Amino acid sequence: MEEPPLLASTSCATGSVASSSSRNYPDPMDEGPSVSVPGLPFADQRRAAGLRASSGSPEVPGAQVHALASMSHGIYPLAKAEALRGLAAVLETADARGGVLEQCYRCAVELMRDEDEGVRLESVRLMSLCADKLNTREGSAGNSNGDQTDIMFLQLSSMARDMCTKVRIEAFNALGKMQRVSEGVLLQSLSKKVMKPNTGNCSIIKGKKVPPKLLFPCAAGIFAHGIEDEFYQVRTAACKSLGALSKFSTQYAQKALDLLMDMMNDDTEAVRLQTLQTLLHMATYGCLSVQEMHMHMFLGLLVDMNALIRDATRKILGLVKLPKLQMFKSAIDVLITSLEKHQEEQEIYSVLFSVGKNHGNFSANIAKHLAKEITISSDGELILDKPRIKALLIVSISVAFSDDKHNKLDIPEVIFSHAIPLLGKISCAIGEVVDQNSLLSYLCRKTGSPFWETRLPSTEPRESEGCSVTTVVDILAQIEKTGKSTKCLDEVLTIQSIKFIIATVERAWTIRKSCNIRDVRTILRTCKEELRIITSNSSGSTGAFLSFLCEYLDAVQFIVEILRSVQLDNSYDLGPTSLDVLLEKLNTSIRRMECCYAGFNTETEVQVCELALLSNLFRLSKQRN
């Protein structure tokens, strides 16, 4: 049976490699001018051939390759390296279906064992380009001969043990660019023990002139040696190629994961980051299957001192599927621990949502336990300021977006009611999956609360002194427009009462300087009592707004008390005083408004921000004095 052209050239190349080692070169001073270009020195010939190759002259590629190939057989290392670069330049623009590929491949094989490091480096680069061109040719022709690509893989593998660091790096980079490799060769590259070649239909090499026993050991454990190399650049290149080849075989990807886990203990930060990038690449292509024995390494990286390593590990965890509930809970617990330690890394909430979304059944289990925790807590309420509570609520809400559509995953209603105050945080964690209005509508529907489908219109701010409540009028106007139901009369009376209370509060704020402080206190206290009575008879969005307004009046009263305390006592005595207590109460009230009443319009949020700013000014003034 006739051999394929490239395979036949391999046989010739193998013979030439063996003969080149025993070739007796003439003395450099005795070498005469080349026959192809009479009268020109060898350096001029090389320069002219390189210019023709790089300039894309109309000369026939075959003639260029022949001239450059003859130069590569010289005795000067720089000339041979330059000739190989010229061959690569010709091959990049040449047709892969012609004979140029075979000639370039032959030259690359012949010079892989050259004594000069630069020549070997260029031969590896040329071999990588030949493999890429071969893949292009076989892809366009519609046929595939995996034997030839396997041979190239084995030849590049032999160069991964070269004495030169640059050659090893280039060899590993070339291996990672391979587009087609058989599973047997890939598995051999991970194992230092030489495997027995398969002689069945999936044989690695066919033909008598290239015995499998001679070439198969070339790939034995090259990646195992690569990740143990003394130079971190080689380890980084081996790690990158290790992940790039994982898409060809599931079994290879699983065994490669064991090597990558060992690389996470590397002393060099660049190697560890490259390992995480490789794992992320594998997870993106669905090649990463995390087992229980790997979890301890991932969990340790989530709380690493390096922020880049923590971030890369979180991205990987957001893509993989964890097979066991205990592994899922451990990942959630460590993410929460990392969040409590690094509260500025708010992207952890997005990772929690992704992890919960990918594990719908496990997230539903978290939601049930959280609902029980809410039930047994005091008055059925939780402190939403804690990162742990926010994280568990986000994981519980992610069940609604899970891909486990075939399973009926029920979320307790109490989860949705506690998630509404954290609307902004949950919306940021979800990202572009759903907009904030749709999310609020969904949460309100699950809790049975009414929801205004249209946004509240913005209003022009009025000129008022201090803590004004200008946005309340617009909210009440919206209530008047949308309050068309069987209880319309009660709502109108409620609105009128609220308007009267707001007007009274504004007058009390205006006269706080000219009037006795006791009168202002009495007015504010009376307004709060009336608001609480109205709130007890209201529900839904109106009740939530009235509850917010009560909290707002508390903050206004604290500010009045603080201003009065500053006027009476300018000494700012050291130690805890009544002023310190008032400042702490004001800060607590503001934080409660920020966390428990999220979802109002922008103007209302601005009012809360103004209160927070005023509180900070009070504290700075006290510290300065």
Image: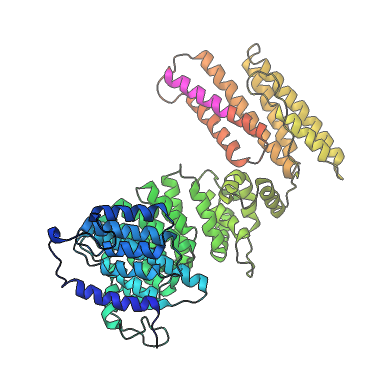
Residue in the foreground of this view, choosing between 20 and 282: 20
Q: Residue furthest top?
A: 514
Q: Using the image, determine if residue 596 lies above or below residue 290.
A: above
Q: Position of residue 368 (x, y in %)?
A: 57, 61
Residue at 30% of width from left, 66% of height from top?
Answer: 108
Q: Is residue 554 left or right of residue 290?
A: right
Measuring from the top left, give residue 447's x and y in whole percent. 69, 53
Nearer the observer, 113 or 536: 113
The structure residue drawn at horizontal position 72% and vertical position 38%, both measured from the top left corner, is 535
The outermost residue toward the front is 39
Res 175 quadrant in image: bottom left
Judge left or right: residue 68 versus residue 534: left
Across and down, in percent, residue 152 comes to 35, 71
Residue in front for this viewpoint, 391 or 212: 212
Vertical position of residue 482 compared to residue 610: above or below? below
Image vertical order of residue 520 relative to residue 174, above or below: above
What stretch of residues is rendered in magenta?
611-624
At a point 38% along the width and 83% down the height, the residue shown is 3
Asked if residue 612 lies in the magenta stretch, the reply is yes
Tell me residue 171's x, y (percent): 31, 63
Q: Quadrant of the N terminus?
A: bottom left
Which quadrant would the C terminus be assigned to in this image? top left
Magenta span contains residue 43? no
456 lies left or right of 249 = right
Can residue 171 be seen in the rendering of this structure? no
